Image (spheres, rainbow, N blue to C red):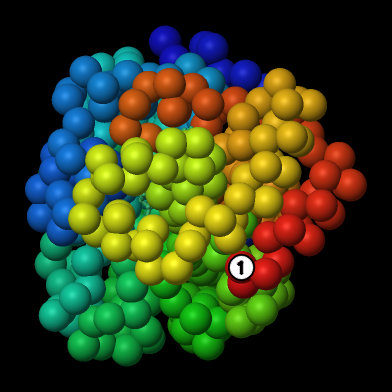
Amino acid sequence: MADKAQRDIEKYPLGRTGIEITPIGVGCWQFAGGRGLAGYYWPGMSEETTNGVVKTALDGGINWFDTAESYGNGRSERNLSKALKAAGIKNGEAVVATKWQPAMRTAGSIKGTIDKRLDFLDGYSIDLYQVHMPMSFSSVESEMNAMADLVEAGKIRSVGISNFRAGGMKKAEETLKKKGLSLASNQVHYNLLHRNIESNGILETAKELGVTIIAYSPLEQGLLTGKFHKNPELIKSGSRMRRMRLMATPNILEKTRPLIDALDEIAEKHNATAAQVALNWITNAHGNTVVAIPGASKVPQMEQNVGSMAFKLTDDEIKRIDELSKQFK
Ligand SMILES: NC(=O)c1ccc[n+]([C@@H]2O[C@H](COP(=O)([O-])OP(=O)(O)OC[C@H]3O[C@@H](n4cnc5c(N)ncnc54)[C@H](OP(=O)(O)O)[C@@H]3O)[C@@H](O)[C@H]2O)c1
């Protein structure tokens, strides 16, 4: 069974929940079956590949997975639970995070839709339930009170948010505190090319409150692997949404090439890859505050992402990467 093979990877606390997670988790947006909004970004994956990605993560010691209601309207949750079952994982042996979809809804739907989430997860408990974005018709307070009720009812273990600003994090924490709980996490866009949380108060607030930052798109959807720099033609094979995102910054490949070259050079010293160095940097540059959830559509990608936890960057290397990527804040 996968957990027998788990290596001795140092785990990070998930906020103050008592739950411990590996610095790298698995982003499951890619498991949405090419459906819904997710389909504009990611084509469907075969069951064999999805199961392979999950098994590779577990075999490499990764102990958690991040999915969402909006990833193919529950398909990602369903495919994750199928893959965990195929890997022989019992409820409680892996940490499962999912998200409530708030658009065009009120906080009342948090309680109204939770049984559907549990149904899609098919026997796996929700260890972390997140508000996907600050976008519902209700206040943060109402959302957090509804979440606290779910904790009390034993439907979820802990509460997180995603895409919230520092003020929203503070409000969420204050509301949960009144119920004897704490805010576990804020899931935000963070990587070497997108470092605004370091200057807009989010990272500082996370450290102050003991809230975990879950970095999404940690490889900037593949750009930080260097594969588009080595073969720019590859950009054309991605979905329109991904192409638009990559092209949003003019001359992106030229502008980011010095950073990618440095990542490659540092990677060689650790017998690693640029992607592994990029993941290692964000999960180590801020103590144990930041964890990352790279997505993978192929098994070898997951193998690489697991390997990002297997080496230590030197202080000089961390500093050099910091200097080269600072301009992208
Ligand atoms: N909370 C939110 O609002 C939010 C928003 C976005 C994402 N997320 C979460 O964050 C997760 C990750 O974000 P993301 O998928 O946007 O971006 P990402 O993790 O930066 O990029 C994932 C993509 O990069 C490529 N890739 C990954 N590892 C690779 C490797 N080792 N070598 C070469 N290519 C590699 C693959 O592209 P190809 O498939 O083209 O090979 C993969 O599909 C998602 O799965 C989702 O769970 C959350």
Residue 41, above or below 56 = below
Q: Residue at x 22, y 49 (%)?
A: 239
Q: Give x and y (percent) for residue 304.
A: 53, 26
Residue 31, above or below 91 = below
Classify the position of the N terminus by image quarter: top left
Residue at image mark 1: 328
Residue 51, above or below 206 = above
Left or right, 242 with respect to 44, comes to right
Q: Residue at x 15, y 72 (%)?
A: 109
Q: Residue at x 48, y 62 (%)?
A: 251
Q: Give x and y (percent) for residue 169.
A: 51, 78
Q: Secondary structure at mark 1?
A: helix
Q: Nearer the viewer, residue 155 or 61?
A: 61
Q: Give x and y (percent) for residue 133.
A: 33, 73
Q: Residue at x 75, y 52 (%)?
A: 321
**Can residue 168 be seen by looking at this rendering?**
yes
Q: Nearer the viewer, residue 289 or 215?
A: 215
Left or right, 119 with respect to 90, comes to left
The answer to which image quadrant residue 80 occupies is top left
The answer to which image quadrant residue 152 occupies is bottom left
Classify the position of the C terminus by image quarter: bottom right
